[in-house]
Image: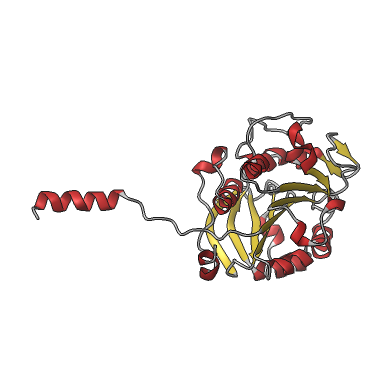
C-alpha cells in the first residue's frame, strides 16, 4: 500500500466520529421541577435531608445549570427546546409548534403534566391559589389540554403512568414561597414511593430546579434516580436542553430546538441497562 493510500485511510478513520453508546430506554420517566434555589443551597443542607439522601441513590450532577431567568423560560426550554423568545413570567403565553408531548405522541408514547393545586384538567388560567401557570409549560399549547392534569390525577399504580410525566408542585411546596424544608418534606411524602418503584421497574426519576436564586451563575441541583443509573456524582456540564436531549435519545424522538446542539447525559448508566434495551 502506498504512502498516499495509507494517509487517505488514516484521514477517513479520523473523520468518522466514534459511535456514542446507546442510552437505556426507561418504561417511565417522572420529572419533578423545584424552584429558585442554587446547588449550594440544597446539597449539603440539613434542611433538605430527604433530597440529600435521594441524591446518593442516583447520579448527582454538580455542574447542572438553568438556561435563563426568570422561571418561565426554563420550563419552556425543558419542555420544547426553546424559550420562544420569552424573558419574563408574563401570562398567558399562547404557543405553537413541536414539544415533548407532541413528539412522544408521534411515536405512540404518552405524556402528562401533573400540577399541584390546579383546579381541574385543562385549566388555562394564570393562577389559582398556589398554582401558577408560569410553572406549567403544557398550559401554553391549547391542543394539549387533556394532558394538562392536576396532581390529584397522578396515578397510585405507577404502571399506569405515561411514558414521560412532568410533576409541578405548587408555590408552597416547590421552595418558591415555602421553605426548603417544606419542599423537601413534600418530595418525601409524594415522590419517594415512585423513587423506590422505579428501582425495580426499569423507570427513572429526575429531580431538578428551574433556576437558582441569582447567587450562583444559575448552578442548580439535578439528580437522576432509577434502575438504570449508577450512583455517584458527575461533573459533566448539563442544562435543561441536555435533559431534554437525553429523553429524546432514550425514546428515539426528533430533536426539539436547541436540544439538537446539546449533549445527552453520559457516563452515569449501568452497563447492563444499556444492553437490555
Give the image location of residue 174, x and y in percent.
80, 52
Q: Is residue 40 above or below residue 73?
A: below
Q: Please indicate whether residue 130 sits to the left or right of residue 32 in the image.
A: right
Q: Is residue 66 above or below residue 233?
A: above
Give the image location of residue 231, x and y in percent.
60, 70
| Picture residue at 56% right of the left edge, 49% below the top | 242
Q: How is the image coloured?
A: secondary structure
Of residue 33 and residue 256, the one placed in the foreground of this image is 256
Of residue 246 and residue 218, the one placed in the foreground of this image is 246
Of residue 141 and residue 182, the one placed in the foreground of this image is 141
| Picture residue at 63% right of the left edge, 30% below the top | 85
Q: Is residue 46 visible?
A: no
| Picture residue at 18% right of the left edge, 48% below the top | 8
Q: Quadrant of the C terminus?
A: bottom right
Residue 129 occupies quadrant: top right
Which residue sits furthest left?
2
Give the image location of residue 164, x and y in percent.
69, 52
Amino acid at each position: 500500500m502506498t504512502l498516499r493510500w495509507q494517509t487517505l485511510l488514516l484521514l477517513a478513520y479520523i473523520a468518522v466520529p466514534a459511535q456514542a453508546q446507546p442510552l437505556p430506554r426507561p418504561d417511565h420517566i417522572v420529572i419533578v421541577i423545584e424552584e429558585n434555589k442554587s446547588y449550594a443551597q440544597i446539597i449539603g443542607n440539613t434542611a433538605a435531608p430527604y433530597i440529600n439522601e435521594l441524591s446518593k441513590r442516583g447520579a448527582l450532577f454538580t455542574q447542572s445549570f438553568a438556561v435563563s431567568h426568570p422561571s418561565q423560560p426554563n420550563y419552556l426550554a425543558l419542555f420544547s427546546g426553546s424559550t420562544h423568545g420569552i424573558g419574563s413570567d408574563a401570562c398567558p403565553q399562547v404557543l405553537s409548534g413541536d414539544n415533548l408531548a407532541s413528539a412522544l405522541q408521534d411515536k405512540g408514547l404518552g405524556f402528562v403534566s401533573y400540577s399541584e393545586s390546579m383546579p381541574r384538567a385543562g385549566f388555562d388560567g394564570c393562577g389559582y391559589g398556589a398554582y401558577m401557570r408560569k410553572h406549567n409549560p403544557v398550559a401554553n399549547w391549547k391542543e394539549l389540554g387533556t394532558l394538562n392534569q392536576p396532581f390529584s390525577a397522578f396515578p397510585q399504580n405507577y404502571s399506569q403512568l405515561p411514558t414521560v410525566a412532568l410533576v409541578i408542585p405548587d408555590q408552597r411546596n416547590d421552595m418558591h414561597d415555602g421553605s426548603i424544608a417544606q419542599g423537601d418534606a413534600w418530595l418525601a411524602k409524594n415522590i419517594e414511593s415512585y423513587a423506590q418503584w422505579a428501582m425495580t421497574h426499569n423507570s427513572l426519576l429526575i429531580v431538578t430546579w428551574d433556576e437558582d436564586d441569582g447567587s450562583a451563575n444559575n448552578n442548580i441541583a439535578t439528580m437522576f434516580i432509577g434502575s438504570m443509573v449508577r450512583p455517584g456524582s458527575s461533573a459533566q456540564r448539563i442544562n435543561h436542553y441536555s435533559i431534554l436531549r437525553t429523553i429524546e435519545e432514550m425514546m428515539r424522538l426528533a430533536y426539539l430546538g436547541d436540544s439538537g446542539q446539546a449533549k445527552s447525559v453520559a457516563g452515569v448508566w449501568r452497563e447492563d441497562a444499556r444492553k437490555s434495551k
